[in-house]
Image (tube, helix red, strand yellow):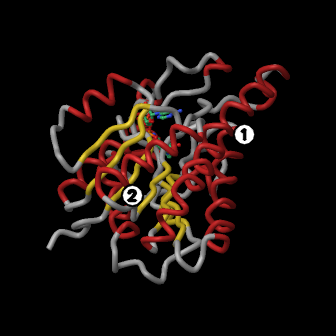
Amino acid sequence: MRGLEGRVVLLTGGGSGVGRAIVERFLDEGARIVVLERDPAKAASLEAIGSGDLSVVTGDVTSYADNERAVAAAVDAFGRLDVFIGNVGLWDFSRALVDLSPTELEAGFRELFAVNVLGYLLGARAAAAALRESRGTVILTLSNASFYPQGGGVLYTATKHAGLGVVRQLAYELAPEIRVNGVAPGGMATNLSGPKSLGLDQQQIKDIPIQDYQEKYSALERVIEPADYVGTYILLASSHDALTVTGTVFDISAAGTPQRPQ
Ligand SMILES: NC(=O)c1ccc[n+]([C@@H]2O[C@H](COP(=O)([O-])OP(=O)(O)OC[C@H]3O[C@@H](n4cnc5c(N)ncnc54)[C@H](O)[C@@H]3O)[C@@H](O)[C@H]2O)c1
């Protein structure tokens, strides 16, 4: 039997990066998936997979109505919701506090927190009733920056540390029916981009030598692909393999803190 046979999953940001890797592997493992994705081209590319077990909703995680539509799409298409995976994030390209003008600091704060933190809360809020009914689970994509400095600038690090608090608090608030955990990957060469308010929306993390950093400075000294991180999501999304796990974040960044080259 495949590990996620029959599990119904809602994933945000499945168009590229680790989200896309989750979609592909979860389908192989027998899950049925709804993806909430903002980018229409990426949504079309997901639809091109052509699986009856995959449904795509175009929308923005910072809109409660869009999160609600995505939950409704899962329940309408597949009859239930077992797993909510909040995964959409923006990075700040390691902009330091004193390199941000006060205006940028405020605007960047609002945009990064709106996507990286509020987006997860809106998704969890929209999914809570359906997850309570199924005794389901929430999984949030966090980061090495949830534990360590230098995984970004202060704004990104603050949002990803906030994610840790969200996991710990919601594990109690949504208990005993719903388990809540996080997965903290480390650097990978993806389309991860930055806030428009900082002029970083056209940049992508894959344009910097992130894989070199990972290979040189992580404990495992290897290049890591998004697909390498997916196993922990499968464990947490399983109907039976993580039943005692809640309120925790798996640091799977292979590194602790990747040190930037001097
Ligand atoms: N890439 C890394 O080095 C790295 C390291 C640690 C953690 N992470 C975390 O992994 C998660 C996924 O990032 P990724 O690297 O796979 O990036 P990615 O940009 O490749 O994937 C994110 C997806 O979300 C979509 N998206 C962006 N904003 C959206 C919005 N407002 N509403 C709906 N969809 C939206 C994008 O179009 C994209 O398909 C993020 O939470 C990120 O912080 C990434």
Q: In the rendering, at what x and y percent does residue 117 appear?
A: 64, 46
**Foreground pick, 26 / 134:** 134
Q: Quadrant of residue 19?
A: top left
Position above or below: 104 against 253: above
Q: Earlier in the sequence, mark 1 or mark 2?
A: 1
Question: Is there CB contact under 8 Å for labels 1 and 2?
Answer: no
Residue designated by label 2: 220
- Residue 212, by quadrant, is top left
The amino acid type, in three-letter code, at marker 2 is Leu
Q: CA distance from mark 1 to mark 2?
A: 26 Å
Q: Secondary structure at mark 2?
A: loop
Q: Position of residue 93 (x, y in %)?
A: 59, 30
Query: Mark 1 belongs to which amino acid?
Result: Val
Most foreground residue, 15 or 150? 15
| Visible residue check, residue 221 | yes
Tag 1 secondary structure? helix
Look at the picture and state if 236 lies above or below 185: below
- x and y, in percent, of residue 28 in the image: 17, 56
| Residue farthest bottom in this picture | 244
Left or right: residue 7 compared with residue 195:
left
Judged left or right of residue 145, residue 16 is left
Residue at 51 percent of width and 43 percent of height = 67
Q: Which mark is residue 154?
A: 1
Q: Residue at x 85, y 22 (%)?
A: 102
Q: Is mark 1 within 8 Å of ligand 1?
A: no
Residue 223 seen anywhere in this rendered image of the structure? no
